[in-house]
Amino acid sequence: MAREEPAFKLKISNLSLFVLYVNTTDMVQLKNQLDMRFNKTLDFFSNTPVALDLSAIANSGISPNFAGLMSFMLDHGMHATGVVGGSAEQREAAVQSGLGLFPDTIVKPAVKTASIPTIAPGIIPNAEDNQPELPGLGLTIKVATGEPNNSNILDSDTQLQKPVSQVPPTFRPTMIINKPVRTGQRIYAEGANLVVLCVVNAGAELIADGDIHIYAPLRGRAIAGAQGNENARIFIHSLEAELISIAGCFKVFENGIPENLRGKPVQVLLDCSDLIIEPLLN
């Protein structure tokens, strides 16, 4: 008799997600600033899961109107999934509103160096089919409170990641993609470098725990060092990207690619927490 397959599997996964740091209990101020950000990046956060970090307001004695905030975020395509930190009263209010509870701390994983084995092909075709196994973008959004150096952080197109606690990856053979990457497609080179030989269309997403090499136009998103490897780099034959990211530091080209880099070969690297884009010599 054939063994019956179980109807489901329950596993712990290393998924990353956006974290919205709530630094004020003034929901009007919060929504106004979020509205400004959303209007600058239409559809960028479409159907994106988000955790709400309440650490900064844990001692305020005030619980936010989670239902109202969740509805506001949903109108802009963001799905609040749970809270991080906060007081016992705030966490209880979050649960009553249908939110989950994440661990109280968010830590950046330590980076282990490892050699990359010989080349071998592989592909994960669609985000919809494979989402439970992907770490995703894992970026951080901060809401301004008037503190020094933070008042305009929402207007900056370079941000710094603080992903949910993860396990450093085990490096695997390089993944090679020799077909165009379609709009809506997501490819993840888990624990590996990623080499793409064809065009990456707008709305497509490349993710790698190591480096990313694109020997064609990049019109979608490229995310290297997805598990926190700050030494990762991205090499692009023709820069036409929507977003590029290394170890969570990312740049969104809301106003288009700078003319001196548009359509040019470039490399992307981190210098401390600064994302550097340099032309490649011909």
Image: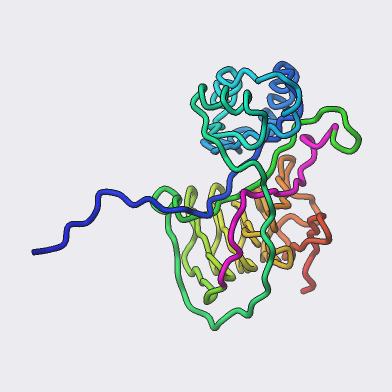
Q: At 56% across and 25% down in the image, what residue appears? A: 92
Q: At 79% across and 50% down in the image, what residue appears? A: 258
23 is higher (above) or lower (below) than 156: above
Q: At 55% across and 69% down in the image, what residue appears? A: 197
Horizontal relation, residue 167 to residue 269: left or right: left
Colouring used for the render:
rainbow
The image quarter containing residue 87 is: top right
Residue 257 position within the rendered picture, expressed as x and y whole percent measured from the top left? 74, 49
The image quarter containing residue 156 is: top right
Q: At 63% across and 80% down in the image, what residue appears? A: 115
Q: Residue furthest right?
A: 148
Horizontal relation, residue 23 to residue 117: left or right: right
Q: Quadrant of the C terminus?
A: bottom right
Residue 69 position within the rendered picture, expressed as x and y whole percent measured from the top left? 61, 22
Q: Nearer the viewer, residue 27 or 137?
A: 27
Is residue 263 a member of the stretch shown in magenta?
A: no
Residue 148 position within the rendered picture, expressed as x and y whole percent measured from the top left? 91, 35
Residue 195: tell me if it is visible. no
Q: Nearer the viewer, residue 160 or 21?
A: 21
> What residue span does the magenta drawing correspond to?
151-170
148 is higher (above) or lower (below) than 112: above
Q: Nearer the viewer, residue 114 or 213?
A: 114
Is residue 156 a member of the stretch shown in magenta?
A: yes
